[in-house]
Amino acid sequence: MFTVKRLSSMLIAFIIIFSLVIGIYSSPAYSAPKETKIGFVLSMTGVASVYGETQKNGAQMAIDEINALAGKKGIKIVPLFEDDASMPQQGVNVFKKFIKEDKVAMIIGPTLSNTARVTDIIAQKEGVPVLAISNTIKGLTDIGDFIFRNSLTEAVVIPNTIRIAKEKFQIAKVALLYGKDDAFTKGGYDDFKKALHDAKIKILNEQTFLKGDSDFSKQLEKIKGVNPNAIIVSALAEEASAIIIQARQIGIPATIPIIGGNGFNSPAMIKNAGEAAEGLIVGAAWNTVSENPMNRKFVDSFTAKYKNPPDQFAAQAYAGVYIAYEAIKKSGTTNNRKAIRDTLSKIKDLDTVLGKFSFTKFRDANHKPIVQQVKGGKFFVLGE
């Protein structure tokens, strides 16, 4: 038999429970940040691993910064990193996986132009935006309107490099050495040859090598015999360091500068070449000593985290993530590939570690190139 006191206690308990239930269902739900998937195709092993490793570090740093600020209402990046092993076919496999299985919003990479010229065709056909962060060969964005890059082409960087080298060192005659079986090194050779012709610099001799070669003494002896003012080399980092070392070993003096393409833009290459790298001249899209406030913060943070300063490939990867994020954020969607593509094409004067960044109407990078020279084992700006 219920007493009045017991009924009163039960009524109070019921009211409390009812209030809690009503409170749960009437209070605003927790608003988790939206998520967007970005696939990263990088050469973390193979001949281009010296570039891919630092690209991953630069990209990851940008992702960590963006996700830390996303809060409850922002957009978080879900990165998917895959190694293409510096091989085009592996790059194709990764692109297909990202597009069909992982349903990524866009792809950043691959590291090598040789791979990009086949993988990007797949992305274009499927309508998936691609942002290249290190591909510099001519005509890459001609593949289609879903292909973008924040890496300055060799066609932009090389003429500026030759102009400044000619002014600084009174170069009138040169010899050329390049890899003839790689899209990047062959493209660099073509751009160097045109720039030299336009600058009215005489080409005394041309020599070639194949990917994986390690002995360049025969080519260098022939170059030494024509007595050039400078040696122009289009090579990836592994061959580049060996060429520099062997050039000095056979007696080509340091007074004859070696001028390299984008493949030389790596502190690891300088480290491997040692003292032989002194005086090396390289065109570039970025330099660690830039006083851009964003760049100073990036360089300091990267150096503290990875115990080594960033190179151009890390900087372009870092900037690439922020460029991609800007497009996704402004598109109003986290997975509509066409909308993201449309927004990417409208990016103009975005502040990045590369400086004010815009895309050209052909979706190529638009910002100022520089020329670097190695002094005391480090890159310094020679001119702009």
Image: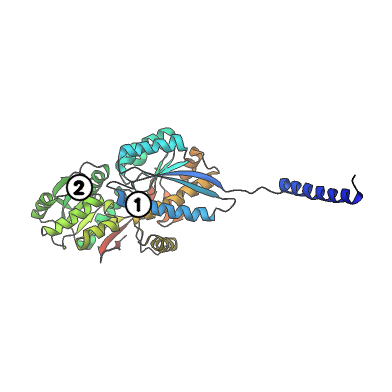
Residue depicted at x 21% and y 47%:
193
Q: Give residue 283's position: percent from left, percent from top.
A: 28, 55
Residue 192 to residue 250: above or below? above
Asked whether 207 or 357 is in front, the reply is 207
Is 258 on the left or on the right of 121, as rendered?
A: left
| Secondary element at image label 1 | helix
Residue depicted at x 57% and y 48%:
33
Hey, what amino acid is under mark 1? Glu
Residue depicted at x 77% and y 48%:
17
Would you say residue 277 is visible in this rendering?
no
Comes first in the chain, label 1 or label 2: 1
Asked whether 16 or 27 is in front, the reply is 16
Q: Going by the picture, which residue comes out furthest to the bottom? A: 376
Q: Give residue 255's position: percent from left, percent from top.
A: 16, 63
Report which residue position mark 1 lands on. 53
Residue 178: image tag: 2
Is 223 on the left or on the right of 138, as rendered?
A: left
Is 221 on the left or on the right of 39, as rendered?
A: left
| Secondary element at image label 2 | strand
Residue 359 to residue 286: above or below? above
Q: Which of marks 1 and 2 is in front?
A: 1
Q: Give residue 42's position: percent from left, percent from top.
A: 36, 46
Residue 118 to residue 373: above or below? above
Is 164 on the left or on the right of 323, as rendered?
A: left
Q: Going by the picture, which residue comes out furthest to the right? A: 4
- Viewport quadrant of the N terminus: top right
Hey, what amino acid is under mark 2? Tyr
- Viewport quadrant of the C terminus: bottom left
Residue 154: image tag: none
Q: Going by the picture, which residue comes out furthest to the left? A: 225
Dot 1, how many residues are within 10 Å of its Cα: few (below 14), some (14-19), or many (20+)?
A: some
